[in-house]
Amino acid sequence: MAAAEVRMSNRAAPVIVGNVYDKYGTRNPVARWLMRGFLDAVSELYLSVRPERVLEIGCGEGRLAQYLISLSHRPQVFHACDLRLDQLAPNLDKRLEFSTTDIYNLPFESASFDLIVCCEVLEHLEFPDRGLAEIARVSSRSVLISTPREPLWRLLNLLRGKYWRSLGNTPGHLQHFSQLGLIRRLSDHLEISQIRTPVPWTIIIGQLRAGSLSSTAHPLSGSSMFLSPCSDQCGQDLKNGENRIVSTEGL
């Protein structure tokens, strides 16, 4: 698949590709426990849809793509992309395809992939709704998205003595989503089916809403402001004690 030109953010701050902290390679036992919870939740949701054509947006070092393609279900196509590919880890699975591209202008036809994976990306975007519209455009069925859960994420950074001057904000984070805030943001495009909240993330999988304009329109054409309710499964997840809504967006 053809790669697009890399287009950087209009903001003066640099765009960060990959992780500020090597969360996949850390030897810290607490960090490893947290990452195990994240990977278990992502893999559970990934396997629940058994995709055949997968696109990961914001692949960073390629570690998550490597993990997912090694699971029991192997898709026919697994394409991963980011603004740059100079952070890719060595010895990745040869079945993985990579390209440089911009989330605001994905170089793929509409409904090209039955699963879009976009983990730890929305918080870096100046215009997350434009990114979500483009994600919905290239998906034919499902979308799996995760973000740090705020304000818990920043609190944990402060507790480990990091980023005090920015009140615990990780470098490159332009947006801050609580669990409820992320649900509200995604519900314009998705019928949310399942939610997982391993500390300190929110992970959501959903299907394109019937008649969603994002499946046919270009992301610059705007989007509906209608907020659809969660599905029954989503409501059940929110009642679960593990998935309590802890704050509101924008803290």
Image (cartoon, rainbow, N blue to C red):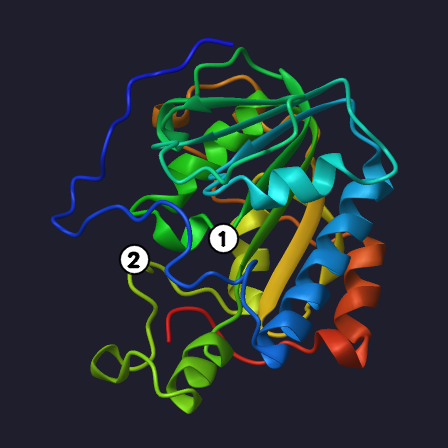
Q: Residue at x 54, y 39 (%)?
A: 62
- The amino acid type, in three-letter code, at marker 2 is Gly
Secondary element at tag 1: loop
Q: Residue flagged by tag 1: what amino acid is it? A: Glu
Provide residue 89's location: percent of width, then percent of height: 50, 40
Residue appearing at x 45%, y 69% in the figure: 249
For the point 44% across and 15% down, the residue is 107
Residue 76 at x, y percent in the picture: 76, 17
Q: On the rendered structure, is 94 left or right of 238?
A: left
Q: In the figure, is residue 55 to the left or right of 223?
A: right
The vertical placement of 51 against 13, above or below, is above
Q: Which mark is residue 15?
A: none
The residue shown at (76%, 59%) is 40
Quadrant hosting residue 38? bottom right
In this figure, which residue is indicated by the disc labeled 1? Answer: 120
**Residue 71 shows in this picture:** yes
Say few, some or many: other residues with alpha carbon within 10 Å of mark 1 (under 14 / 14 to 19 / 20 or more).
many
The reply to whether discs 2 and 1 touch (Cβ–Cβ < 8 Å) is no
Residue 37 rendering spot, x and y as whole percentages: 71, 67
Examine the rendered structure and indicate whether residue 168 appears above or below residue 250: below
Q: CA distance from mark 2 to mark 1?
A: 11 Å
The part of the image, by quadrant, that contains residue 41 is: bottom right
Q: Quadrant of residue 164?
A: bottom left
In terms of secondary structure, where does tag 2 sit? Answer: loop
User: Is 156 in front, or is 123?
Assistant: 156
Residue at mark 2: 172
Q: Position of residue 20 (x, y in %)?
A: 37, 60
Classify 10 Å Cα crowding around label 2: few (below 14), some (14-19), many (20 and above): some
Residue placed most toward the observer, 39 or 187: 39
Asked if residue 213 can be seen in this view, the reply is: no
